[in-house]
Image (cartoon, rainbow, N blue to C red):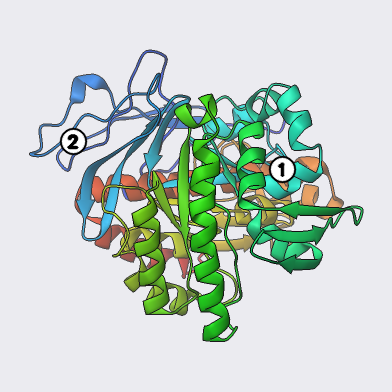
Amino acid sequence: MGWFKKRPVGLSPDLYYSAPPSPGRTWLPRAPHVRVGLTIAPRRAMARCMTDTLPTAPGFRVPATPGDTRFAFTIAATDGKARTGTIAMRRGTIRTPAFMPVGTAATVKAMRPAEVRASGADIILGNTYHLMLRPGAERVAALGGLHALSGWERPILTDSGGYQVMSLSKLAKVSEEGVAFASHLDGSRHMLSPERSMEIQRLLGSDIVMAFDELVPTTTTRDAQARAMERSMRWATRSRSGFDAGGEHAARSALFGIQQGALDVELRRQSAQALVEIGFDGYAVGGLAVGEGQEAMFACLDHCVGPLPVDKPRYLMGVGKPDDIVGAVERGIDMFDCVLPTRSGRNGQAFTWAGPLNIRNARFAEDTGPLDPRCDCPVCTGASRAYLHHLVKAGEMLGAMLMTQHNLHFYQALMAGLRGAIAQGRLTAFADTFRRDYASKAF
């Protein structure tokens, strides 16, 4: 660990930091008048919201606690359309708005579970498609489930596999039964149906299961989008039945439905109505962040979030860039996932409060400053830009690990900042400041 060196840590008053609570202590959302102290250790900062600082704001509710709780969503504060709160589940509490690091193949790439947790993550995402192909859902179950296999003890959300089937598989054929496809690994043939997707996610031991849906590009015809949405709603009904038949797993886990309809206002409304009639623990907005651009995505969110239940969490799948997340939170989204912080980290891109930074750039070869002066993660308090530049240029695996570690910390610090700003009723100021600084490229 010789690469660590001590230096003063500069902390912006606009930033809110988060980390796992100490044993025996309970996380509570912050009301507008609550001040939270910052305890700084040489290699990390932790904001502790203690039970002896209970807010007394009107309407405040103490969130449900994990343990025997199957699924309980509590909204602690709102600011415009944005909300902050908690989801209590058997394996732990998820603070919202939440970002879920993606653990595609039972791992968040280049990170150990303890490091993912130390970044502030409360939940991660697993991938049904990849895990069903390798090592196989039945093998994962035989090994004790995804939590035991991977060493991540907190909640895991698994996607249904529908997106990967459409995007990665060769010769995929969609029918009312499901999707027949060839594995991108070895060409073997498989059928993924709503029932099989529910079975796989049950074998994996998922805490939040996603309904099986059909995704079509936003550039297809409206008729094609309508047919896919209507089929997705029929598959949602079958997913509900398949999940409910899961016995003990269904009794301790949650099921989310997925709204579809591309960028069409009426199709999105019809999809939301159908999902609400079926009934789910949470509702995802699917079919976005697939090339339509931020402006089109935000325009869709402006009308597609409203028809979803106010008292259930809303999850924007596959999003995204930091400024995408800020805009989506402003529009009422509670949960996010994306491969960007890990994939970009492995390729030498860091997300900073001043915008994305390419550490491969020659200008950083002799830069002894921290990766991001406003970040207090172990990488920014211990490694110089010059060292990271060298590691990445040399192809050293440590470079990918450290860049990924920083990016995950940055994303979780952003989520903590959003939660704090909503609780204090100053989200607009926080978002405006973030967008100004993020666009500055003032490295």
Q: CA distance from mark 2 to mark 1?
A: 37 Å
The reply to whether residue 3 is in sight is: yes
What number is the disc on residue 374?
Answer: none
The foreground one among 96 and 163 is 163
Q: Residue at x 80, y 45 (%)?
A: 133
- Percent position of residue 61, x then y: 18, 33
| Residue that sits furthest to the top in the current view | 24
What number is the disc on residue 109?
Answer: 1
User: Regarding mark 1 in the picture, which secondary structure is present there?
Assistant: loop
Question: Which tag is nearer the camera, tag 2 or tag 1?
Answer: 1
- Residue 220 position (above or below residue 368): below
| Residue that sits furthest to the left in the current view | 58
Q: Tag 1: residue type?
A: Lys
How busy is the neighbourhood of tag 1: few (under 14 within 10 Å), some, or many (20 plus)?
A: some
Q: Residue at x 55, y 66 (%)?
A: 231
Q: Residue at x 34, y 63 (%)?
A: 273
- Percent position of residue 280, x then y: 40, 47
* Marks 2,1: beta carbons within 8 A: no
Q: Which residue is mark 2?
A: 34
- Residue 367 position (above or below residue 73): below
- The quadrant of the picture occupied by the N terminus is top right
